[in-house]
Amino acid sequence: MAININNLQNTTQVKNDKVEQQLQRQQATVQQNASQGANQKQDSVSITPQAQQFSKLTENASNSNGIDQDKVDKIKQAISEGKYKINVEQLARRIVHFESEIFGKK
């Protein structure tokens, strides 16, 4: 079996020529896109003041632990001073309502 060494060099040259042609096509495409992009209007986004306010409120809520510490401190102080009164009727109603939601009875 004979190997033609002369054709190996030509094959490499042909591959290099194809790669260069492909690069030139890509560069031409990029230049066309750039020139077309310069003529086109740019897109923009604006956020309404309500959306900005909602975003701030959402951020504050996510950073909050959900506990009103002032209210907790006032209740603790009232309990320690013996001034905290419990409305037993309201407590009973809320317990019944809570259990009916859990067990599905009304």
Image (tube, grey):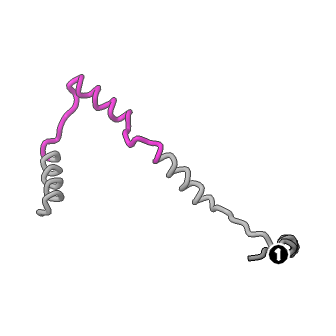
**Residue 106 locus on image (x, y percent):** 12, 63
Residue at 78% in and 69% down: 42
Q: Is residue 82 left or right of residue 69?
A: left
Residue at 55% in and 50% down: 56
Describe the element under mark 1 as helix, strand or loop.
loop
The residue tagged 1 is 4
**Residue 27 locus on image (x, y percent):** 86, 71
From this view, report whether residue 89 is shown above or below residue 86: below
Q: Is residue 27 magenta?
A: no
**Residue 14 locus on image (x, y percent):** 86, 75
Front in this rendered view, residue 11 or 3: 3
Front in this rendered view, residue 13 or 2: 2
Magenta segment, prevailing SS (helix, strand or loop): helix
Residue at 86% in and 70% down: 9
Q: Is residue 90 left or right of residue 55?
A: left
Q: Is residue 67 left or right of residue 34?
A: left
What residue span does the magenta drawing correspond to?
A: 62-89
Q: The residue under label 1 is which amino acid type?
A: Asn
**Residue 98 locus on image (x, y percent):** 18, 53
Q: What is the residue that sits farthest to the top in this orientation?
A: 81
